[in-house]
Amino acid sequence: MHLHNLPRSPPSSSGNAFFLVGHHVSRWKRNYNGCELETRRFRNNHRDRGVKKCLGASICCSSHVPNGSSLPSIEQLSNARVIYSVAPSMGHNQESHPESHFRVPAIAKALEEMKLTPKFRGSEVIELQHFEPASTDDITSVHARAYVYGLEKVMDQALEKGLILIEGSGPTYATSTTFQESIIAAGAGLALVDSVVAASKITKDSPTGFALIRPPGHHAVPEGPMGFCIFGNVAIAARHAQRVHGLKRVFIIDFDVHHGNGTNDAFYDDPDVFFLSFHQDGSYPGTGKFDEVGSGDGEGTTLNLPLPGGSGDTAIRTVFDEVIVPCAQRFKPDIILVSAGYDGHVLDPLASLQLTTGTYYMLASSIKQLAKDLCGGRCVFFLEGGYNLKSLSYSVADTFRALLGDKSLAAEFDNPNILYEEPTERVKQAIQRIKHLHSL
């Protein structure tokens, strides 16, 4: 998730989508106007983990949560196929920046229009609305305390200036609400982990979670922000699964077009977290080389597969069958977490892979089945990149269809005439090289 220079005006395709999601943006802004998070609460929040396990959590947001509200019952969760949470971070926004507050509302609008929400699907789909922000302990299980408290302190500066640059390679910006909204986003992911784990205790086919959240997280390194990302949402969720639920072995799949260097770094020497990323070779941030395989006790539990530009559906299907499946089977995970970036789509402006909406349907369906085969269906997706609002929203919607067991409607959106021949030989060489390195 990277942009060398901020565009002076949004692309025309995004401009149309901005108009279409305008009323959703207004709705989210109204909802978030009443949301006040005291920083003292974050500093002193030592959450009762027993309460989390019982799913009796709430978020301190007056416009969302009535007194006495709680998350859905275990019975409701066990009847669902998809559970999702929404944290759009409406105050974290820079005009004309691709990682904008239009992204999550565009997805929400598509889910509603395509009748994939609880309103239309009943008990099959649950939206978690009442969840706590991530606590100090949650965030610092991955990030340095100096960074976390330092970011909190510069919110006053952001309030005074309106917007500040906190990291230059992305570039990564912050507004006065960035800190608060980022801990809400991380908390939305933790609530999904809690929900999926709870459901898995009473059903062999646990529902899949999807955190529709921003800012994204997979570039954020332990020491600070990077590449549009503030906190490592997936990494924080992995530590939470281990510490709170005793799920020792966590398998993370990152299919964002850019290498998830932050997640990579967080677990580079950890034998109990397997991080697997396939991404476009030569793209930001320049990490994720073949020989980055982990270190110390964690050697062999990091797999990075850089794919040549132009790789598409055929390449990704082969990667899944010949790399992801055997790695997961050998690792034997207790839960699978997914950094779901949709910026590999052929229409996305920030990269040059040729993934389609149908590719993302295939990935979601296959990952869901893999989780069912290996870890009781325990699986949570986390939104990362994706900057063409139309391809992003359609692809997430088709991901939902895959998780629900519905037929793909990708053919209604994808245009095969814009695709060109994949670099088959180079893809084959890359896959053979990674299989040799990891003895697959």
Image (cartoon, rainbow, N blue to C red):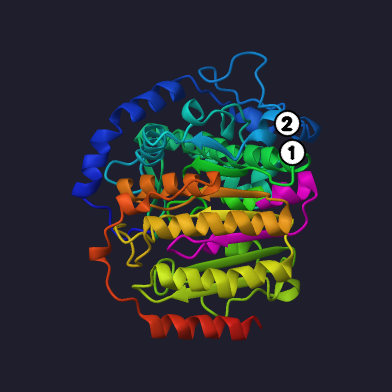
Foreground of the two, 59 or 124:
124
In the rendered image of this protein, does residue 100 appear above or below residue 372? above
Of pointers 2 and 1, the one earlier in the residue sequence: 2
SS for callout 1 = helix
> What is the three-letter code of the residue carrying label 2?
Ile
What residue is shown at x 52% (from left), y 51% (from top)? 217
In contact (CB < 8 Å): disc 2 and disc 1 = yes
Left or right placement of residue 115 versus residue 335 in this view: left
SS for callout 2 = helix
> What is the three-letter code of the residue carrying label 1?
Ala
Foreground of the two, 42 or 250:
250
Q: Position of residue 378 (x, y in %)?
A: 68, 49
Which part of the image, by quadrant, shows the N terminus?
A: bottom left
What residue is shown at x 40% (from left), y 60% (from top)? 169
Label 2: how many residues lie within 10 Å, few (<14), some (14-19) or many (20+)?
some
The reply to whether the magenta stretch includes residue 314 is no
